[in-house]
Amino acid sequence: MTNHSPFRYFKTSPDIIRLAVMLYVRFPLSLRNVEDLLPERGIEISHETVRFWWNRFGPQFAAEIRRKRVQQFLAHSNWKWHLDEVFVKINGETHYLWRAVDHEGEVLENYVTKRRDRKTALKFL
């Protein structure tokens, strides 16, 4: 089975797609602001194109960043994390929010359940 690139049907370079999506996600910019910034780099695209790329590739980029970050932290011997449990109300019902938090306070993963038991905690871990 061959591993196909997610960019294979796009005419635009993957580097340009990554730049546009990262500008939108990393900085507090609107889609139109990203559209206005890119012509300075010689890239003429619409704000709707940036929105489409963000919807299409955003989760993939986020997973890639998360994976690299966790690998980087695991390489350090002083990396620690803990499991945090919070009670939240969603539409008037109590739910349990489980969060894995690293030593810097960054949330690694979230999990919301209606029940609080050992099975769900082990599933999260």
Image (cartoon, helix red, strand yellow):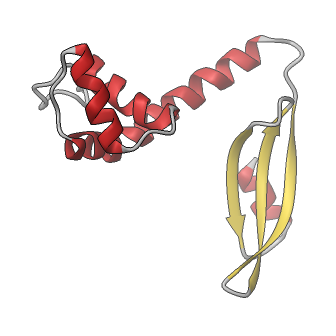
Q: Is residue 70 left or right of residue 34?
A: right
Work out whether 29 lies above or below 121: above
Work out whether 117 lies above or below 52: below
Q: How many badges with numbers are in the image?
A: 0
Work out whether 25 lies above or below 117: above
**Residue at (44, 32) in percent of width and height:** 61
Residue found farthest to the top: 76
**Residue at (34, 37) in percent of width and height:** 33
**Residue at (12, 32) in percent of width and height:** 9
Q: Quadrant of residue 72?
A: top right
Q: Nearer the viewer, residue 95 or 92?
A: 92
Q: Is residue 47 left or right of residue 111?
A: left
Q: Quadrant of residue 39?
A: top left
Tell me residue 1's x, y (percent): 25, 27
Q: Nearer the viewer, residue 123 or 42?
A: 42
Q: Is residue 4 left or right of residue 113?
A: left
Q: Nearer the viewer, residue 123 or 55?
A: 55
Tell me residue 64's x, y (percent): 49, 28
**Residue at (33, 34) in percent of width and height:** 34
Q: Nearer the viewer, residue 70 or 106?
A: 106
The answer to whether residue 108 is seen in the rendering is yes
The answer to whether residue 2 is seen in the rendering is no
Tell me residue 26's x, y (percent): 51, 32
Q: Is residue 15 left or right of residue 93?
A: left
Tell me residue 123's x, y (percent): 72, 55
